[in-house]
Amino acid sequence: MGARSPSDDPGAIRAAAVAALARRDHLAAELLEILQSRGFDPAATAAVIAELASERLLDDARVVERFVAFRAQRGQGPLRIAMDLRSRGASPALIEAAIAAGPDWGAVAREVRRRKFGAAPPESWPERARQSRFLQYRGFSSDHIRAATGAEFELD
């Protein structure tokens, strides 16, 4: 009977995974990447991650919901948050559900604009454009930006 190498020892993999999760929540894809970068066997690592998920120590839905709430509180919009979550390996269904269940994005955009530029709405088109670019960079959709800047188009 051959001895297990440290790279495929489930106990060592689990200890490293729990240590990583103790620092902060991770998505399953992130945790897999972290553990593989430390030299653990991919198959053994995937098995440990599945075990952690079945024990609810690793929950992608919870991580995505917390991420959306935290980033929204920091003044980021749904487009930027979704992009960041996709880059971290979150599933599109989880991202969509968390964004839909998130805060009132129009209200978040209005608050971000008010904190940055003051309570008065922009008076000129160049100022509206400047504020719109800022909100766009923060990840808000055009609907949210129009509502926040008061840039409703008048039809003649």
Image: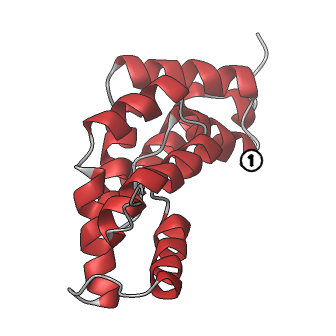
Q: How many marks?
A: 1
Residue 47 visible in the shown view:
yes
Viewer-nearest residue: 33 or 22: 33
Please state, as top left, top right, bottom left or bottom right, where the C terminus lies in the image.
Answer: bottom left
Residue 25: give x, y in percent of width and height: 40, 47
Viewer-nearest residue: 97 or 149: 149
Residue 150: give x, y in percent of width and height: 31, 69
Secondary structure found at label 1 = helix
Residue that appears at 58% across and 48% down: 83
The image's colouring method is: secondary structure
Viewer-nearest residue: 12 or 89: 89
Looking at this view, name the residue that lies furthest to the front. Answer: 156
**Where is 51 relative to 73, above or below?**
above
Residue that appears at 55% across and 69% down: 137
Residue 70: give x, y in percent of width and height: 31, 59
Looking at this view, name the residue that lies furthest to the top. Answer: 1
Q: Quadrant of residue 102?
A: top left
Residue 54: give x, y in percent of width and height: 38, 16
Name the residue beneath numbered marker 1. 37
Viewer-nearest residue: 64 or 92: 92
Please state, as top left, top right, bottom left or bottom right, where the N terminus lies in the image.
Answer: top right
Instruction: Tell me the crowding category of disc 1: few under 14, some 14 to 19, or many 20 or more residues within 10 angstroms, Cα based.
Output: few
